[in-house]
Amino acid sequence: MFMEQFKINKQLKLSLIGMLLGDGNLQSFSNGKTARLRIVHSKKQSAYIEHKYALLKPVIRTELLSYTEHNNNGKSYDKLYFNTVTTNKLKFYYDMFYRGNAKVLPKLIHRYLEPVTLAYWYMDDGSLKWKNRSKAVRICTDNFTKEEVTHLVETLNQKYPWMLATIQKQRSRYRIYIPNKDYQFSKLIEPYVIEEMKYKLPLKKQ
């Protein structure tokens, strides 16, 4: 019954697309007919994952779960995560973002780069370019190819001509840089950024 009551309205749809541009991952089942969403964040971002959990609670059957991740340098990171149930309601998003098991940039991404989409993408993968020294921001796009990042930048600049987004190379990866000179980007997404994540967002001091 709870699955029948779960409705993906326009804002949730755009939020999901923002999460998938960022850290969200989908797994496909039943020969591509169904999928489930997996969300993982560090415990330091507990308020953010709790926010996502609340948005998707109708399709989650467990409490938030945790584990410790160990990297090759011997460091440990405490993580929180949840999986949604496997449902055909997420098939649309899997078909949009995946080819085989690889995440790709959707061909029609220009249809979905609305402020709420950008807010979730930025909360996932955005950061200050130079903390306390600049209004500029960057978005980590390591999961995408140079061609895909180029397409994202071109699409952002077509939709928001003031954005003046560019690509910056970081080792072998390519990331998006946004000057945010007059706080236009901050103002665009701020209504959708939860309070606990606003530390990532340069805001004009009153």
Image (cartoon, rainbow, N blue to C red):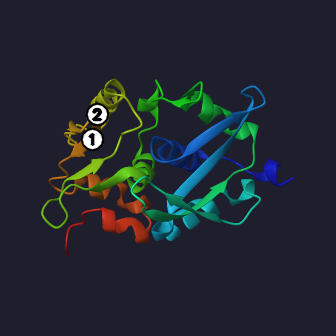
| Nearest to the observer: residue 57 or residue 142 | 142
User: With 35 as the anchor, is 198 left or right in this view?
Assistant: left
State the count of labels: 2
Q: Is residue 46 above or below residue 39?
A: below
Residue for point 20% across, 52% down: 180
Looking at the rendered structure, the kind of residue marked 1 is Ile
Whole-percent x, y for residue 195 in the image: 42, 71
Looking at the rendered structure, the kind of residue marked 2 is Val
Whole-percent x, y for residue 166 in the image: 20, 37
| Nearest to the observer: residue 99 or residue 18 | 99
User: With 98 as the anchor, is 198 left or right in this view?
Assistant: left
* For discs 2 and 1, the disc positioned in front in the rendered view: 1
Residue furthest to the bottom: 206
Q: In terms of secondary structure, where does tag 2 sit?
A: helix
**On the image, which quarter does residue 52 sit in?**
bottom right
Mark 2 touches mark 1? (CB < 8 Å) = yes
User: With 97 as the anchor, is 105 left or right in this view?
Assistant: left
Residue for point 36% across, 55% down: 189
Whole-percent x, y for residue 99 in the image: 56, 24
Residue for point 78% across, 52% down: 5
Residue furthest to the left: 133
Whichever of labels 2 and 1 marks the residue nearer the N terminus, that label is 2
Q: CA distance from mark 2 to mark 1?
A: 7 Å
Residue where numbered disc 2 is placed = 153
Q: Is residue 77 above or below residue 88?
A: below
Residue where numbered disc 1 is placed = 176
Q: Residues within 10 Å of mark 2 (few under 14, many from 20)?
A: many
Q: In terms of secondary structure, where does tag 1 sit?
A: strand
Whole-percent x, y for residue 148 in the image: 36, 27
| Nearest to the observer: residue 167 or residue 152 | 167
Q: Is residue 34 above or below residue 10?
A: above
Quadrant into which the C terminus falls: bottom left
